[in-house]
Image: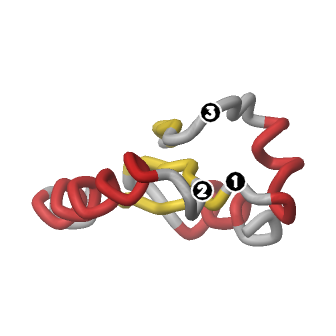
Amino acid sequence: NAETFWPFIKETAGPALVVVDFFTTWCGPCKLMMPKLAAMSAARGGKMIAVKFECNAANKEIGKELGIKSVPTFQLWK
């Protein structure tokens, strides 16, 4: 959520590559992507972390800040 996004990116993830999947619950393609990202993450043994971030009204400010205009959108953070 909006309260935990930046602390997770800046502190919790450590040196791992973070793939953020920006999604909505009504998006069909969004539902198909996360299992594939999770499998990629598992195959990389902690060097990559895949997370989902719901772009709903409660998280609108983060979406605006990061320029999310459509879903699914993926960003890589290191």
For the residue marked with disc 1, what is the amino acid? Answer: Cys
Q: Is residue 40 left or right of residue 70?
A: left
Residue at the image position 30 percent from the left and 55 percent from the top: 32
The disc at residue 24 is 2
Residue hosting label 3: 70
- At label 1, counting other C-alpha atoms closer than 10 Å, the crowd grade (few under 14, some 14-19, many 20 or more) is many
Residue at the image position 64 percent from the left and 60 percent from the top: 54
The disc at residue 8 is none
- At label 2, counting other C-alpha atoms closer than 10 Å, the crowd grade (few under 14, some 14-19, many 20 or more) is some
For the residue marked with disc 3, what is the amino acid? Answer: Ser
From where the camera sits, is residue 48 visible?
no
Q: CA distance from mark 1 to mark 2?
A: 6 Å
What is the x, y in percent for residue 11? 62, 64
N-terminal label among 1 and 3? 1
Marks 2 and 3 in Cβ contact (< 8 Å): no
Marks 1 and 2 in Cβ contact (< 8 Å): yes
The disc at residue 55 is 1
For the residue marked with disc 2, what is the amino acid? Answer: Thr
Against 14, residue 78 (above or below) is above
Residue at the image position 11 percent from the left and 60 percent from the top: 43
Nearer-the-camera pick, 49 or 2: 2
Split into 4 quadrants, where in the image is the N terminus? bottom right
N-terminal label among 2 and 3? 2
Residue at the image position 38 percent from the left and 54 percent from the top: 16
